[in-house]
């Protein structure tokens, strides 16, 4: 059967998602242009930043001072639960810890800067958005490709919860949404380029 402590993991994820929604909706000042898509991006970015700092930040600390397997507390118990699907998160894995250091320090900070850029409608919004999305996708690539190349000795795919929820869904979200945001930036930059090109042609 499924693990006894599965609900706390999904509960923490749900709590962070709710916190992300509340954070995005409580942003001061007028709503930025873009309607639901922009609001959806803000909700995701708030959730993204919270996960990086609240969940992954402590994971990096626990891994650098010891290991998740030998640690106690709520965050350690959540990572122990996830470690049932991917054992690399239980003990010090250089690749995972290296990726997570980059993820917490760079991706978490970029998410906060991007939230500011969207709310304030800054001209560099899509530069930050593209950079963050590429970093998120690179993190997923480096998390799983080395493992797949070594025939996945640390992944538990025999249990549907571990395979389809912990590994596929939780990680797939960080591929799907950054991919969509990357596409959005490409579309918006193309629109800006066409508008600028049309304006130049009018004055020629």
Image: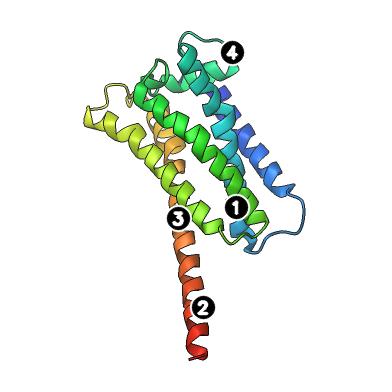
Residue 40 image label? 1
Q: Quadrant of residue 164?
A: top left
Direction from residue 24 to residue 146 in the image, left or right: left
Which numbered disc, 3 or 2, marks the residue closer to the eye?
2
- Residue at numbered disc 4: 73
User: Could you tell me if the residues under marks 4 and 2 are in contact, i.e. CB atoms within 8 Å?
Assistant: no
Q: CA distance from mark 3 to mark 2?
A: 20 Å
Which numbered disc, 1 or 2, marks the residue closer to the eye?
2
Q: Position of residue 156 (x, y in %)?
A: 34, 23
Nearer to the camera, 68 or 132:
132
Instruction: For mark 3, give the secondary structure.
Output: helix
Q: Position of residue 78 (x, y in %)?
A: 53, 21
- Residue at numbered disc 2: 195
User: Could you tell me if the residues under marks 3 and 2 are in contact, i.e. CB atoms within 8 Å?
Assistant: no
- Residue at numbered disc 3: 182
Identify the residue at image location x=46%, y=29%: 101
User: Could you tell me if the residues under marks 4 and 3 are in contact, i.e. CB atoms within 8 Å?
Assistant: no
């Amino acid at each position: 059967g499924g693990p006894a402590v599965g609900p706390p993991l999904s509960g923490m994820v749900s709590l962070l998602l709710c916190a992300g929604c509340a954070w995005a909706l409580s942003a001061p000042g007028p709503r930025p242009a873009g309607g639901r898509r922009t609001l959806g991006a803000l909700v995701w970015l708030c959730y993204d930043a919270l996960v990086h700092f609240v969940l992954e930040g402590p994971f990096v600390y626990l891994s650098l001072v010891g290991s998740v397997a030998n640690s106690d507390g709520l965050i350690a118990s959540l990572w122990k639960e996830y470690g049932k699907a991917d054992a690399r998160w239980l003990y010090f894995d250089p690749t995972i810890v290296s990726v997570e250091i980059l993820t917490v320090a760079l991706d978490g900070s970029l998410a906060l800067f991007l939230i500011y850029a969207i709310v304030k409608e800054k001209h560099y919004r899509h530069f930050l958005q593209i950079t963050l999305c590429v970093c998120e996708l690179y993190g997923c690539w480096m998390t799983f490709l080395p493992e797949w190349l070594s025939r996945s000795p640390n992944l538990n795919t025999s249990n549907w919860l571990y395979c389809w929820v912990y590994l596929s869904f939780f990680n797939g979200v960080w591929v799907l949404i950054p991919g969509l945001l990357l596409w959005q930036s490409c579309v918006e930059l193309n629109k800006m380029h066409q508008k600028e090109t049309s304006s130049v042609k009018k004055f020629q």
